[in-house]
Image (spheres, helix red, strand yellow):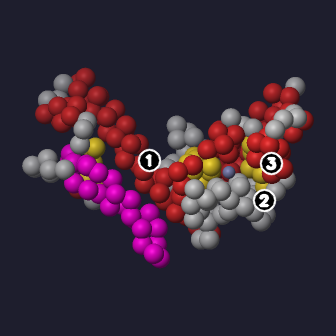
């Protein structure tokens, strides 16, 4: 930390076999002893270093802002690998299995208080199902067993090619195809319920 040397941070993202996501390069900016943690920053944000040296009110508010941004940036790769590993690198909705075309989607967006970058607020989704989920074309209804996929009514009524038919319409009413083996890693009830409400509200407004 004193020498501002770049480090590689290995964050545990899965057990048996143990998996780590490397986040690099990072530097240590400070130690929060009472919380037993360090403040990390990606190396290239030189602004953070400048903010630390002088403490004008503007700089210290800039520093707080950068800390927050930094925290988000450091969390993203870890969130992604944790979620993808938990879902065995498959899309929860359609079981598609190529990580290059998979995203770790937030169930509740990260600006919301429930929207933490944790595996229970994550879903491994292929690009099309991620976009469909975020745009409220596709909803996930909480259920006693596996959550159920729902497609918005106006899309169900539409007639179009194979992407619409096989990629969306035929999934309506089907349970999620892939869920984490470990129960503790499955989507949180609260988060799913929040996202389903949002999906339903879109259905009512858009169809009416
Ligand atoms: Zn998919």
Q: Sequence order check: which comes first, mark 1 or mark 2?
A: 1
Is ligand 1 closer than 8 angstroms to the Cβ of mark 3?
Answer: no
Work out whether residue 96 or residue 197 is closer to the camera in this orientation and state it.
Answer: 96
- Circle 1: element type: helix
Q: Sequence order check: which comes first, mark 3 or mark 1?
A: 1
Quarter residue 86 falls in:
bottom right
User: In the image, which is nearer the foreground, mark 3 or mark 1?
Assistant: 3
Q: Work out which residue is located at the far front of the displayed protein and give it.
A: 161
Q: Residues within 10 Å of mark 1 (few under 14, many from 20)?
A: some
Whether 12 is among the magenta residues is yes
Residue 149 position in % (x across, y down): 78, 51
Does residue 128 appear to the left or right of 58 in the view shown? Answer: right
Q: Residues within 10 Å of mark 2 (few under 14, many from 20)?
A: many
Whether 72 is among the magenta residues is no
**Residue 76, which numbered label?**
1
For the residues marked 3 and 2, what is the alpha-carbon distance in whole angstroms? 15 Å
**Residue 147, which numbered label?**
none
Q: Is residue 151 visible from the viewing direction of this image?
A: no
Work out whether residue 46 or residue 188 is closer to the camera in this orientation and state it.
Answer: 46
Q: Residue at x 61, y 44 (%)?
A: 127
- Residue receiving disc 3: 166
- Residue receiving disc 2: 175
The part of the chain drawn in magenta is 7-30
Q: Please, is residue 136 above or below residue 40 in the view?
A: above
- Circle 3: element type: helix
Q: Residues within 10 Å of mark 3 (few under 14, many from 20)?
A: few
Quarter of the figure with the C terminus: top right
């Amino acid at each position: 930390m004193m020498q501002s040397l770049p480090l590689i941070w290995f964050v545990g993202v899965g057990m048996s076999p143990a998996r780590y996501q490397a986040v690099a390069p990072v530097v240590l900016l400070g130690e929060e002893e009472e919380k037993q943690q360090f403040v990390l920053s990606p190396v290239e944000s030189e602004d953070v270093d400048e903010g630390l040296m002088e403490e004008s009110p503007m700089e210290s508010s800039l520093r707080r802002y950068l800390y927050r941004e930094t925290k988000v940036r450091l969390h993203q790769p870890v969130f992604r690998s944790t979620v993808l590993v938990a879902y065995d690198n498959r899309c929860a909705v359609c079981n598609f299995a190529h990580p290059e075309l998979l995203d770790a989607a937030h169930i509740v967006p990260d600006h919301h208080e429930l929207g933490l970058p944790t595996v229970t607020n994550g879903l491994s989704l292929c690009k099309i199902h991620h976009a469909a989920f975020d745009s409220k074309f596709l909803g996930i209804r909480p259920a006693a067993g596996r959550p159920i996929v729902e497609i918005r009514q106006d899309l169900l009524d539409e007639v179009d090619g194979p992407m619409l038919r096989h990629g969306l319409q035929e999934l309506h009413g089907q349970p999620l195809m892939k869920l984490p083996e470990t129960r503790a890693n499955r989507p949180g009830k609260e988060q799913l319920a929040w996202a389903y409400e949002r999906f339903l509200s879109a259905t009512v407004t858009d169809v009416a």
